[in-house]
Image (cartoon, rainbow, N blue to C red):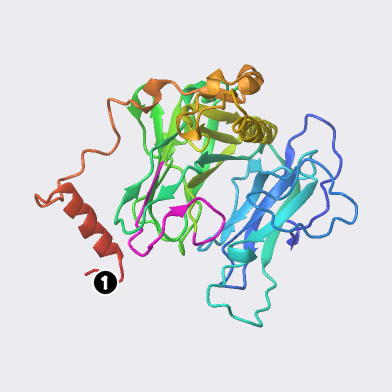
């Protein structure tokens, strides 16, 4: 390896087309306990002249910078890729980057500490020895999060990356590692792997999630090959007994998330996001594509929302149905996205599996009702537990 260099590294040297690509790996240089997380995004365009620092970045790294490249969360140290795999550097979509260190007002500082100075960041490790495969990051999960207060267990409806999306893969993918991400109410998260009606070992599983101990975990070998036609199902559970108000999706640590980020190879630029559209009100449809497809879907949904707002008050106007019952396949504005494959229908059988994985465990319920089992488990995870 060459000497480690800061995250803003020069692009890789030019090379003949068809050769393997350069490699980058990462370790964190986090110095402040106030940081919620750090994300380095790919950018598919050069930033505008004198653009400076982006304000209020939201869920991405700014315009044209929506694909995660490197991610740090609390508990994570260093990531190192296999010797034949590397993240691309110096490609058209990986020459410019946007570094986002955000949380509750960029940092999570609920005690309003003053005078805190921070020089945290990431360090890229790269090599001039080109590697055979590019790695990519697949985002699974959802933003349709509404958690009522005072509940020991709130489990979201499962979110599906459907077989109708993975069937478009040109080749099987090797899943290397998975990082799950929720906030402080998160208690459990699972990403199941379904193939031909049989559940394989989970791609990711945290039965006792803790926000302060997040890391990339290796995908079990039995589940590490994603074949065309497989489906992935992500489910999140929360404990809201500490809250008095409804908690929804958001960037703040006091809001919530439900994501699994999967590192895989070979990279497919048209397979970076795969999730059913629960947030838009139609879980029978899924987003399936890369950064361009995700931006196109977001743009179309914003256009649809504007049309609803404009047509609603007018006499005789027929507004689109509310998001809770939205039929996306019936909306003309979305028809081009279905034709292009950015939106696909979720086959009903994708969530049906006759042979569930890991259900042969011994009965540890002691004859208690299910709700009492859950409460006992939550007490064991709390500071007041035995």
Please give the name of the residue rendered at 30% of the width and 66% of the height, measured from the top-left corner. 382
- Magenta stretch: includes residue 314: no
Provide the residue designation for mark 1. Answer: 384
Residue 62 is situated, as x and y percent measured from the top left of the image, at 73, 49
Judged by its main secondary structure, the magenta piece is loop
Q: Quadrant of residue 7?
A: bottom right
- Magenta stretch: includes residue 236: yes
User: Which image quarter holds the N terminus?
Assistant: bottom right
Is residue 144 among what the camera can see? Answer: yes
How many marks on residues?
A: 1
Q: What span is colored magenta in the figure?
A: 235-254
Residue 130 is situated, as x and y percent measured from the top left of the image, at 74, 42
Residue 298 against residue 317 in the figure, above or below: below
In this view, the residue in front, 273 or 298, is 298
Is residue 267 among what the camera can see? Answer: no
Q: Is residue 270 left or right of residue 181?
A: right
Residue 336 is situated, as x and y percent measured from the top left of the image, at 66, 19
In this view, the residue in front, 113 or 192, is 113
In this view, the residue in front, 206 or 250, is 250
Secondary structure under the numbered disc 1 in the rendered image? loop
Please give the name of the residue rendered at 62% of the width and 63% of the height, measured from the top-left corner. 28
Residue lying furthest bottom: 115
Residue 278 is situated, as x and y percent measured from the top left of the image, at 48, 35
User: Which image quarter holds the C terminus?
Assistant: bottom left
Residue 37 against residue 338 in the figure, above or below: below
**Mark 1 Cα-neighbour bin, 10 Å: few <14, some 14–19, many ≥20:** few
């Amino acid at each position: 390896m060459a000497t480690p260099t800061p995250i803003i590294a020069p692009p890789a040297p030019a090379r003949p087309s068809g050769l393997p690509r350069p490699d980058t790996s990462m370790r964190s240089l986090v110095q402040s306990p106030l940081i919620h997380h750090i994300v380095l995004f790919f950018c598919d365009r050069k930033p505008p002249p004198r653009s400076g620092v982006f304000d209020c970045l939201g869920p991405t790294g700014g315009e044209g910078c929506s694909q995660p490249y490197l991610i740090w969360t609390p508990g994570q140290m260093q990531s190192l890729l296999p010797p034949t795999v590397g993240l691309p550097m110096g490609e058209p979509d990986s020459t410019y980057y946007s570094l986002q260190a955000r949380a509750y007002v960029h940092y999570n500082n609920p005690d309003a500490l003053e005078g805190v100075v921070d020089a945290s960041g990431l360090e890229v490790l790269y090599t001039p020895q080109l590697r055979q495969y590019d790695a990519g990051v697949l985002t699974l999960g959802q933003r349709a999060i509404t958690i009522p207060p005072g509940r020991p267990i709130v489990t979201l409806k499962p979110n599906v990356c459907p077989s109708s999306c993975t069937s478009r893969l040109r080749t099987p993918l090797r899943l290397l590692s998975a990082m799950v991400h929720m906030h402080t109410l998160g208690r459990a998260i699972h990403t199941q792997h379904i193939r031909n009606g049989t559940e394989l070992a989970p791609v990711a599983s945290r039965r006792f999630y803790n926000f302060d101990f997040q890391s990339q975990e290796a995908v079990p070998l039995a589940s590490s090959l994603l074949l065309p036609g497989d489906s992935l199902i992500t489910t999140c559970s929360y404990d809201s007994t500490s809250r008095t108000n409804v908690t929804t999706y958001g960037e703040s640590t006091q809001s919530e998330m439900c994501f699994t980020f999967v590192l895989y190879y070979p990279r497919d630029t048209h397979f970076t996001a795969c999730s059913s559209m629960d947030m838009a009100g139609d879980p029978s449809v899924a987003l399936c594509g890369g950064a361009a497809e995700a931006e196109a879907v977001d743009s179309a949904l914003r256009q649809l929302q504007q049309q609803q707002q404009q047509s609603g008050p007018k006499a005789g106007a027929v507004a689109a149905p509310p998001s809770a019952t939205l039929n996306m396949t019936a909306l003309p504005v979305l028809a081009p996205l279905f034709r292009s494959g950015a939106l696909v229908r979720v086959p009903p059988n994708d969530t049906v599996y006759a042979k569930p994985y890991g259900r042969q465990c011994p009965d540890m319920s002691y004859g208690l009702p299910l709700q009492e089992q859950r409460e006992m488990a939550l007490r064991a995870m709390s500071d007041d537990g035995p």
